[in-house]
Amino acid sequence: MDKNTTFLVVGGDFRQNFLAARLSKFSDRVYTLGLSSDFKCEDCTKLSGFSDIGFMPDVVVLPLPATSDGKTVNAPFSNEPIYIDRLMNFCKNDSIIVGGKMPPELCERIKSRKLFCADYFGREELIIENCVPTAEGALSIAMENTARTIAGSKVLILGFGRVAKATARVFSALGAKVHVCARKGRDLVYAKTLGYSPVPIANLCDSLGDFDIVINTVPAVLLGEKELEKVSSDTLIIDLASKPGGVDFKSASDRHLKVIWALSLPPKEKDCEKAANAKKINSRTCWGVAVHNT
């Protein structure tokens, strides 16, 4: 990496702060926009807004996820919206814009401006490594929102993909009695070989009343009205799935169930609270952490 490469790190949670600090070890030209002010980096230049951009960045680094609406950067610590199209106006023809979970239409728009676009979350090794902090974030949510210990708790995990495997391992390590519900027979067999109790998807509805914690990792509504009728009022439901999620939130609200839709983990909830205090918004909906408990 050339020490003269100019980076503009934009938006996101504390991960972007650490990234900027890391990049400053390799480049003398690292600028930040819309990052948290709590994390200091002496070798980075903090910008207060578009008016401070008096250069053409070689690389623009957007967060994970890059955007929620395809127009503005996910920037919970910014006092003003950061429009991606306006960022592109400062780029040169060979500038690179990278981000996580970039919508295809956004990538096409970037390319139409003769700029390079890359989604770093398309890298398999990053996806796998990201599963660990996601699982730890789920554990933290469970510990903060249940009155009993994780050890001895009956935990049901829906799905058995990368995130589910990491989550099962973390909860099992603390002594939870982990059950895995999946559609594919091979996943159920694999879960059993790892010491987890398999639950066929056909038996899900009849099994739901037995668990203290239910964790969904499947981006499809598996917990609909019929299934939620079987869930105990004391059960904590954590939804780790991306939109549309795996829970019928209206039905859960009607039944006064506690559901936490933890999008975009691993940002910690205290990050959300600080961003919320700055913007005077509800911290429980900031950065995708939504609590449905009425």
Image (cartoon, grey):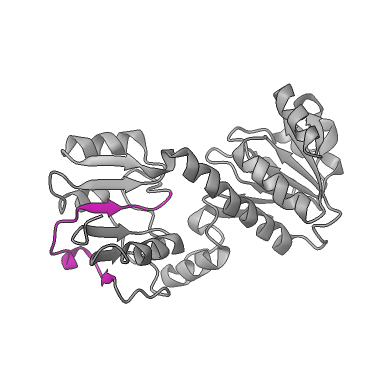
Q: Nearer the viewer, residue 256 or 27?
A: 27
Compared to 188, does 9 lie above or below?
A: below
All told, the count of numbered labels is 0
**Is residue 62 inside the magenta stretch?**
yes
- Quadrant (top left/top right/bottom left/bottom right) for the N terminus: bottom left
Of residue 253 and residue 164, the one placed in the foreground of this image is 164
Q: Report whether 48 appears left or right of 279.
A: left
Residue under the point 83% across and 52% down: 153
**Image side of residue 276 versus residue 166, left or right:** left
Q: Is residue 137 above or below residue 163?
A: below
**Image point (70%, 64%), residue name:** 144
Q: Is residue 31 magenta?
A: no
Query: Residue 103, position in %: x, y?
Result: 37, 38
Q: Magenta stretch?
A: 44-64
Residue 59: horizontal and vertical position, in percent?
A: 24, 52
Image quadrant assignment for residue 55: bottom left
Question: Quarter holding the C terminus?
Answer: bottom right
The answer to whether one can see residue 81 in this image is: no
Q: Is residue 128 above or below residue 175?
A: above
Q: Residue at x 58, y 41 (%)?
A: 241
Quarter of the figure with residue 2: bottom left
Q: Quadrant of residue 107?
A: top left
Residue 97 percent location from the top left of the image: 27, 47
Instruction: Name the residue at 48% across, 45% down.
Output: 126
Residue 111 vs residue 194, the one in the foreground? 194
251 left or right of 132 in image: right
Residue 270: x percent and y percent? Answer: 55, 68
- Horizontal side of 183 relative to 210 (left or right) equals left
Q: In this view of the protein, can residue 98 be seen by the observer?
A: yes
- For residue 2, above or below residue 160: below
